[in-house]
Image (cartoon, rainbow, N blue to C red):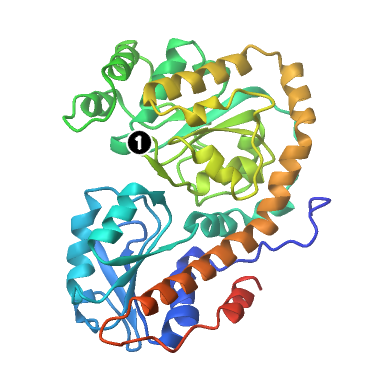
Amino acid sequence: MVSGFGNCKYLVISVENFYQLLYYKLLKPINFQMRYGWPFGTTKHIMAFNHNGWSEDSKKMIPSAIAFFHFDQEPLYTKDQTTLYDGFLVARPYRYPQILANSERSRLKKYFCRENNLLDWYFFYHGFAALDWYRDAFYLDSDRAITCAFMTLNHLVMQKRSYRMAMIARLWQQRLLDRGIVSFHASHQSCAEEINHPDCELSAHSKMLIQNFIDSKNNLPIMAHPGKVDGSASAHFGHREYELRQQALFTVVNETVFFDDKLHLTEKIFQPIVCGRPFILTGAPGNLQYLRSYGFRTFGDYIDESYDSESDPDRRMDLITQQIENLCARSLPELNAMLKDMRPILEHNKRHFFGDFKTMIVDELVENFDQSIRTWNNGRVDGRIYSLHPDTESVKRVLLA
């Protein structure tokens, strides 16, 4: 076990059983229903839970009962609203408020809840997922010497994640691709199709950089370690992935949300944290501060983190690229000295992840649930009130066991 990491709270419900636990501990005792998208993170099928068990047809649920819909694995976009309406909202009378479980803070979510008479149950779903997937890192050593300045792993690079190909094109332009550990799972054809798609969100400048990158005839896809580790699955975190991430100083974390104005982080931000490494967050504005609000420390003493407040996507990518270039200009002894100097921050982040962070997100989940029920009761229709209130303190004890 890593020294100094006592009082570990890393035991956590698995992602596979997360919704079932919430249903049986929070919803069933007060006769509520639950719906969620299946497979996880999609709305292809709407699964439903109530006192009769589960069903794949949410419209068979009791329409007059209060229900929760879990859309907490992916960020909410305008295109998702029709699917949510058809699969969830239409299944009950409009006059009764329902509850949307989600993992983002955004104006779009507030608008969607307001227009559809939904109450907002926010919690950090991906924090629970990370505690499940990365728990083995608690036992692994973080003191390996680094071999390069940065790493960036890019699996999905289309549509909302197309900014990743723009970032790779910038690194190529600055001759930085061979200075770090890089993966990029795309072909020349898929890159060309994306930048020519009418719904592409990239700027004309980024499209030009990508086109130049494509025309340069670089070998694509780029694999970080062919045949060993490709960084494509966040949920797969074995010793080889851990050792790979130990080789670079900074991890450039390419988050799910970049173009849209929302606070939303996934399990990806916790990969360098559990590996005892610093990070640069490539995400939407304000998400670095959002992470700090959960008690984690970042690295403004070592790099310029003003990119987090930059609203223009191109400018934000340019600022991040500049930080990578600055790191690559340092010698390997200098980088290792930097790693040694930032050790207190790294140890705090890892200790916090395996300790108080879980308490924070459990408290948040349960308290926000409690607030949703109280809000529903305060706005009850026709005198209806859910007098069966959940025993939130006992639920906290279960989740923190």
What residue appears at the point 50 percent right and 57 percent down from the top-left corner? 124
Asked if residue 41 can be seen in this view, the reply is: yes
Q: Which quadrant is the N terminus positioned in?
A: bottom right
317 up-or-down from 160: above or below = above
Q: Quadrant of residue 346?
A: top right
What residue appears at the point 38 percent right and 79 percent down from the top-left corner? 377
Residue marked by disc 1: 161
Q: Which quadrant is the C terminus positioned in?
A: bottom right
What residue appears at the point 42 percent right and 76 percent down from the top-left corner? 373
Q: Crowding near pointer 1: few (<14 within 10 Å), some, many (20+)?
A: many
Q: Nearer the viewer, residue 52 or 369?
A: 369
Give coordinates of residue 307: x percent, y percent: 50, 26
What residue appears at the point 72 percent right and 21 percent down from the top-left corner? 335
Q: Nearer the viewer, residue 121 or 115?
A: 115
280 up-or-down from 386: above or below = above
Q: Quadrant of residue 144?
A: top right
Q: Please tell me whether mark 1 sits on a helix, a strand or a loop.
A: helix
Give coordinates of residue 231: x percent, y percent: 49, 39
Give coordinates of residue 371: x percent, y percent: 47, 71
Q: With 190 as the anchor, is 29 left or right in this view?
A: right
Dot 1 amino acid type: Arg
